[in-house]
Every structure is written in structure tokens, then in C-alpha cells.
Amino acid sequence: MKNECVAVLDIRSNEVSFLLGSKGVNGTFVFSGMQSESYEGYCLDGFFDEDSFRRAVMRAVSDVQQTYEGRIGEIYVGVPSPFVSVVTKGHTASFPRKRKISSQDIEALYESGMNDLLTEGICIRRSAMYFTLGDNRKHFFASDLYGVPTTMLKGALCYYFVSEYFHEFIKKLLGDMGFPEVKFIPSTLAQAYYLLSEKKREGYAFLLDIGFMTSSISVVYGSGIVHEENFNCGIGSVLVQLIETLGVDYPVAEELLANANISGGTVPKDMAYVSEIAERSFPVQKVNDVIKFALDELCERVDAFLRKYYKDKASLMLSANPISVTGEGISGIKGAAEHIAKRVSWLTETVYPDLPYYDKPTCSSRISLLATAISDSAKEGWLEKFLNVIGGKRK
């Protein structure tokens, strides 16, 4: 495969996407292939049907391979947050005398910080909320420390562990398909890097990813995730509520949800939506009430999360840091962000890639993973490795 082109497997809770892309100009990307396939999905307990997932991955990869003339050597896999455990730790390294910080010192800080962690799973990534040199001044990028003399290096470190089940399952699946080189990226972390500006991440930034079967809320600080929780709530739970309450089939529930908008207030009682599939009408207010009721479960989980960790900071956060909402749930449930804002009394904003055609919340995960994979691939180049060895940084 060409050095500038990377392969990414994005795993969502009802769909997988396989894409090949490289860095374009002005923050854009050049795509060499992309294919998405639906499957049975997963919940917090794991995949509903491993065979369904396996077939979806094979179809997506095969479709892209048929039209791609290059060789695919390694694949970057986005790990959904239900399969990731985030562990944070403050750690300090002291030196007998002043020394200029190098990349090796940063690496040693991560390694020593991980030694006494007892978390199960396999560590797939490390990052830091920030670093300090003993003066309590926060540095959000390790490269800012290179060459600075100090006797003490501190870090608010984050470690990301993937479950052994997921790790082995994916490696075997892709290995059997002829891809022995598999690298893992926490999907939420990739979205945090790509969707949230560096300035926003210098304070507490909140990211709510609403999927089909599951959703997650994360608190991001600097380059690390402080807290993260997952819920079995999403578009799927809303569709189930429509089916059970209105007594309709799945296709009709999809039709009703696609045409509903819960951002407004009450609507006239006689206003109805005529379903072309069911060939009958449904009161718009009734449909909206069912959707809101189903979405309230997610709102309650989010509200409990915010009260648990940030009860005393709520007034400050309301004005400074809105909840950034993304994922297929925002596209699939019109007015969801506004409803969540009202229910949890916290400002929200919808975030998505700033790219033509891909400027949709449904594309957030795959584009964020592609951007992170390209960045990782560039760091593995010979020049970057040389600079790391000598402890310097690229100007």
C-alpha cells in the first residue's frame, strides 16, 4: 500500500465501514475506496451475532479491494467505547539534576506510570491531559517540553485498554482475511481530537456520541479522556418504543422517525402524518411524545453522569462548555440535541466533520479515525523516528 494511504475499519453499533484514504490539501482527504455494511450490532455486553459482524466486515473489505490497485498492508481499527476502559493516573518522574526533556523521558513517564495499573485488557494507546515541570504550569503537548531543563516531570496520564475478547476476535478475523498487521484506535478519542478544537479541550469538553444501539458520553481535557460512560440507548431504543406504543412494524417506525421533528413545542391536535407504508395516519403530537419519552432514558443517563462528576461546576460549564453531540442519532432523530439540552439543562451543539459531502454527524467516527490513522502513520515514518531517537522535534 502506498505510504500516504491508510486503511481504516470503523465499527459502529449497527454498521461497519472500511475506507482507504490519504491526506489532501487544506485539511481535506483523498479517498481511494469506501464501503459500509450493516449487521446485527452490539450492546454493552458485546456483539449480538459474531457471524453477522464477520460477514459485514468481509463484504466491506472485499468491495474496496476489488477497485483498489494497491496493496493493503495494515489496518487501523476503531474500537467502540463499550469495548474500551479508560484509566487515568497522575504520575511524577524526578531526576537527580537538571536535564533537558526529550521524547524518551515522556516515554519513560508513561511506562513507569503503567507499571502498577491492575486494569484488565490490552493497552492500545496512551495520552495525557497535560504535563507540568514542577511549576504547576500546564503544557498540553509533550513536544512543548522538549529541550526544557528540569528536575521533575509530571503528567496527568490516560491509558486506554481494549478487552481481550475484542482484541483477539478482531485480530483473528482480519488475520484470516490476510491482514496480520492490525492497529487499534479508541474511537471516542479520535473523535475528540478531530471534532473538538485544541482551545476547547484546554477546559473540560463534553462529547456525546449517539449511536444506533449504544451511546457514550465523554469528558475530554487536553489530549486525554477524563471520564467516559456508555449506555444501551440510541436510535434502536426509539424505534422499539414506536413499534410497541403505536403497534406498527419496523419499516413504519423508521418512516415515522425519519419524518418527525421534536425540536418544536406542541402541535395542533388534528395535525397528522400519513404513512405511505402503513396507509394510515398518525397524530404528529403522539409520535413526537413517543420519541421524546424514549429519548428521555438517554437524557436521564447523561444527567446522572453530569451530576455525578460535575455537580459543583454546573453553572460554570453551562456558559463555557456546551455538550458537543454527534453520531447517527443526531441525524436520525431531528431535534434530539435541543431536547437533550432542555432535559439536562445544559447547552448542546452538534459537531461533525468540516468537509464537503462528509459534513454530517453520521460521518464523524469514520473521518475522525481516518485523520488519526494518517497522523499515526506519519509518526511512524523514518524522519519522525529519527527525531524521537535524538529527542528533538520537527520545526
Image (spheres, rainbow, N blue to C red):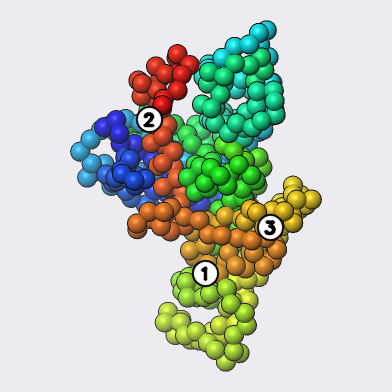
State yes or no: discs 3 and 1 in contact (Cβ < 8 Å).
Answer: no
- Which image quarter: residue 279? bottom left
What secondary structure is marked by label 2?
helix
In terms of secondary structure, where does tag 1 sit?
loop
Q: Is residue 69 left or right of residue 307?
A: left
Residue holding disc 1: 334
Compared with residue 45, is residue 280 higher up or lower down, i.e. above or below? Answer: below
| Image-quadrant location for residue 243 | bottom right
User: How far apart, in angstroms, are the residues tagged by discs 3 and 1?
Assistant: 23 Å
Q: Amino acid at mark 3?
A: Leu
Q: Name the mark nearer the viewer: 3 or 2.
A: 3
Q: Which mark is residue 48?
A: none
The 10 Å Cα crowd at callout 2, few under 14, some 14 to 19, many 20 or more, is some
In the displayed orientation, state which residue is furthest to the right.
Answer: 312
Q: Is residue 186 above or below residue 352?
A: above
| N-term mark: 3 or 1 | 3
The first of marks 1 and 2 along the sequence is 1
Of residue 187 and residue 231, the one placed in the foreground of this image is 187
Horizontally, is 305 left or right of 60 in the view?
right
Quarter containing the C terminus: top left
Residue 129 point in image, percent of width and height? 62, 35
Q: Residue at x 63, y 53 (%)?
A: 321
Give the camera-side residue of 133 and 288: 133
Helix, strand or loop at label 3? It is: helix
Q: Quadrant of residue 388?
A: top left
Contact between labelled residues 2 and 1, with CB atoms less than 8 Å apart: no
Q: Amino acid at mark 2?
A: Ala
- The label on residue 318 is 3
Q: Which residue is mark 2?
A: 378
Q: Nearer the viewer, mark 3 or mark 1?
A: 3
Q: Could you tell me how far apart the alpha carbons at marks 3 and 2 are, in whole angstroms?
A: 38 Å
